[in-house]
Amino acid sequence: MELFRGEVETQNETLNRGLLELEEGAGGKAVETLMRAAHSIKGAARIVGLDLAVSVAHAMESVLDKARDGKKNLSSDQIDVLLSGVDFFTQLAGIPDAELEPWLEEKEPHAESLIEALESGAPLSTEPPPAEPKPKPKAKAKANPKPKPEPAPAAAEPVEDDGPADEPDLSMIDLFRVEVETQTETLNNGLIALETGASGEKVEPLMRAAHSIKGAARIVGLHSSVKLAHAMEDVLERARQAQLTLDSGGIDILLAGADYFTQLGQIPDDALTGWLQEQRARAEHLVRQLQSVQSGAAPAPAPPPEPEPEPLPKQVPAASRDFLPEPPAAEQAAFAPDAREPAKKAPPPEALAPADASSRVVRVTAENLDRMMALGAESLVQARQFEPLLAELKRFKKSQNHVAKFVARLRENTREDGSIKGDDILSSLDDMLGAIRQQSSHLISNFEAFNRNSTNLTDRLYREIISSRMRPFSDATGGFPRLVRDVSRQLGKKARLQVLGRSTEVDRDILQRLEAPLNHLIRNALDHGLEPPLARKQAGKAEEGTIQLEARHRSGMLLVTLRDDGRGISTSELQKRIIERGLVSEEMATNLSETELLDFLFLPGFSTSSEVTDISGRGVGLDVVQSMVHESGGSVRVFSKVNEGTTFQLQLPITRSVMRALMVQIAGEAYAFPLARIDRAIHLPIGQVKSIENRQFFDLDGRSIGLVSAAQVLELEDKSGPREHLSVVVVSERNHRYGLAVEEFQGERDFVVRPLDDYLGKVPDISASSLTEDGEPVLIIDVEDIARSIDSLLTGGNLQRIRGEGAAQRTAAKRVLVVDDSITVREVERKLLENHGYDVDVAVDGSEGWNAVRLGSYDLIISDVDMPRMNGIELVRRIKNDANLRDLPVMIVSYKDREEDRLRGMEAGANYYLTKSSFHDETLIEAVLDLIGEARGE
Amino acid sequence: MSTASPHPESSQENLLHRPAPAGYLENWNRSLAEMQDEAVENTTSLLIFRLFDEWLAFSTQAFAEVIETRPVHRVPHRSNDILHGVTNVRGTLILCFSLSRLLQVEPSEGKDRTLSRRVYNRFIVMKQEKRRWVFPCTEIFGVHQLPDDELEEAPVTVAISRQPFTKSIFRFRGNTVGLLDHELLYYKLDKDVL
């Protein structure tokens, strides 16, 4: 049976793929492959004695055989029937041995109808051929959801749903997302290109994109998506055949369809079902719109594949692919609760598991993966070579022992006058030493080769892994042509986006972080940069503005340039605004260089545009762009010429996973400063350090720079003594420069950057972690953060002391632990008690409460009864059974106000039982006072 | 030549094919069957280790691996008495804490009660769902299958600070070993240390 399963799995994949291709109109050769697949299944079924499967496979084979000979053309309906055959096998292969018999019995009528349909060439009829619909097998199939990692059974899932409702199969949803992401990009860009004139060539890839989405949606069981994609495909197909001319209205509808998919791809798993339900009307509306585009433009000479606007027609093939014929509506409703509903509302846990964040899908090229596997295998081989090397070393040691023995013998045989008895000892010693010398040189050369090879190998493996993180720049630019189109239309401007360096390789993290800033800059360029067509004409420029986006590598950095040919930024205007805002004095403003002036654009809340528009200038200014770029370890510069345009240049590391940094020693431990973010690293004779009002500083380039000990900023105990020279790292942040004295510089290195354990939260002054060559931890300094820390240390260092006093006072209050799973109740109780001066802690359920009780010394526990994990009664019981906690008063506050509930609580050992209505009067506080007295009393 | 010497092949064969001694198979049968019985008994798998002169244990469910001691890097603004810092475990930096400080086990002048022949300071790596923790210990005995009925309730006399963390105790080779509640340990680290 296992054999059969394996066979079915392989062949079904071929069949599924092939049949879909067939639908697109593949030739006789493709059919032959399919025929062979069906034949193989037949053979395998015969071997394991599954007669029913043999007949189905046989029927499929003969249909395909006829199609191959050209005797018969396969209609969509026929392919649907064939697909249901495939699904039948998929399901069959998924049935555990023990349940096989009953399953086959139940499925027999459906298999027979399948065979009949195959033979007759008619679509599967909607009327149930075998008399009564059987809800039972369905319930059974649902009741035994097996974890199915391979795609085939997942593909079978959706067909069980014969209604138009979506029943997403979450195990495959990640793949669907990737597919949608790729294809919507194609659609978006292609559709925009269509506006400038359609041709069959241009439409074809779009049609394929829609088709791919359809296929992917079918696999994950999103029927509304299947329908929408199908409608889009139809429209595009007709456009391709020039039966339909797409105007911009039509393109808008198609774009709206693409938008639907883009959004769908971004919905997290748990929200998916809800979203689909909400958006169902929208999807259906889109389908109708598409259908009217299709029929409106050309009065349908040939019947479109899906003529009716109602979702109903889709039910036919969908139902036919199920082995359960469509039951009458009433019947459907009757068994819905037991079979369908649970599956819809609560997908089996197995299906949910892969949706976990740890299994998130990332794209890696197959080539890259292959090379990694090869290198991985090679490193295994490499490691094996240690063994012969070790054996050789052992032999070496043996020879040494041998020599030592001979030396001992030599000593014994040496006469008092120094002569030796029997000179053969000496000569054999010579021989041995010669052999040892040979052995050792052999060992060394072996080891050298080994060392060289493994260094080379690990280096390559590492590079390969790094490069697996790389994606072409075009991955981030996918949405931009669409953005430019939509925004410029909205603004009544004409603009064209030109993207250069699409294939430039960029780390996927950087790429992701690049998208938002670029999006913002493009909006900015369209809104503020480019002039309206008329103004452009008057200025002697082409009506259509150009926005050029370019990515390239330059000296180990990624350089992204966004250039517009708009009006540019007038520095005199800028000067005026700077003075107006009172940012600098008038005198200083006139002395500022152009670059310095343009830097003001990046100040928070600074905008050159006087009006706030929908497109940009919504307070999300260039400062956000700058800080986002800084976060990725890069920098932004801006150049501008009046009337010629503005250029933004973003310089970013090519990868975030490797960073060049200066390694230093602070308080005896290794830290690193990213090279891109430090100004200077200098050795400073202690004599040059000056001191005013207990603050130290030194002069550099004619400016005074405040000096702080790095250990002090990081709150580390520094045991190093005074030195003659200081090692100082100079960093700057927003026009301020600071000197950080470290213990010593240890040189520049490349660091593989890893995030610090997120358990620590954001650690002040630290951005990430890495390892030295010796495998010791290094922490990477967050320069922006540390500049801020230095600043606050210099200006107000006494903050901590004040806080310390406050904490000391609070400890006097009595401590109460509130355990409740409702946040509202917790907060109400907390406020109530805190108002009366108690020190309150909270726990979200009994289990956490039990942990808290054992660790904190509380004066009172207030607990709810019904809670997940551990209920209140159990909590009370545990407290009262614990020798150390026995005397701790416990109060139960519950919605349950019946006498038996009260008794249950008191039996467990509660000292008080209140109902939740007691919040409204003073009952709760009175009870607390009764049990433990005033917050600060005895 | 071959006729003159005894057949080495046949004598080897004889050795291998000689009948088993009486009762041999039955003996094996019985002892294998008995071993089976033992495994069926309810036991808890524990990692037993020592902090200074205190023997402790926790469930192997919470245990990932034992590694050699290595440098621990303090984390600015975060390191304290209990949380030492981070250390490199197979290329990943893992939080290192002092279990002895957390349980307030103090180094003592008295003789160590060793169990193993050789005593090494080691790091124990604990796993908590997706997170791992590491702490230094004085000695590791190893993993032990403890029959559940040997677990005793922790006496109230256990030092107050350690009391909540010690779920129960058991006797092991002349030592009293405290079984730690690792869930509570994680809770403590989560709430109070960070």
Image: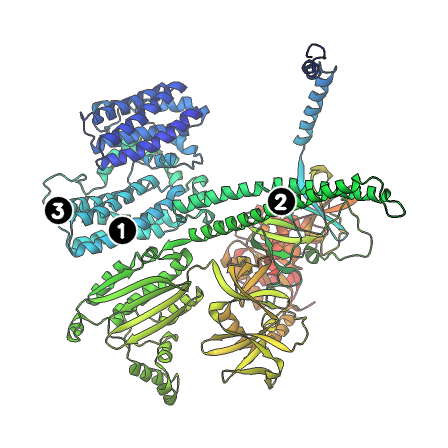
The image position of residue A616, as x and y in percent, is 30, 69
Q: Vertical placement of A903 versus A832: above or below?
A: above
Q: Work out whether residue A925 or residue A654 is closer to the camera in this orientation and state it.
A: A654
Residue at point 45% right, 78% down? A735
Secondary structure category for the residue under label 2: helix
Q: Vertical placement of A560 versus A440: above or below?
A: below
Q: Which image quarter holds the C terminus of chain A?
A: bottom right
Q: Which mark is residue A186?
A: 1
Image marks 3 and 2: residues in contact by CB distance under 8 Å: no
Image quadrant in which you'd find residue A434: top right
* Same-chain status of marks 1 and 2: yes
Foreground disc of the pair 1, 2: 2
Disc 1 to disc 2, C-alpha distance? 61 Å
Residue that extends furthest to the right in the rendered view of this protein: A416
Q: Which mark is residue A242?
A: 3
Q: Vertical placement of A42 versus A924: above or below?
A: above
From the image, tell me which residue sits under label 2: A442
The image position of residue A258, as x and y in percent, is 26, 51
Question: Callout 3 environment at 10 Å: few (<14), some (14 to 19), or many (20+)?
Answer: some
Could you tell me the amino acid type at mark 2?
His
Could you tell me the amino acid type at mark 1?
Thr
- Give the mark, 1 or 2, whose residue is nearer the N terminus: 1
The image position of residue A866, as x and y in percent, is 54, 49
* Same-chain status of marks 3 and 1: yes
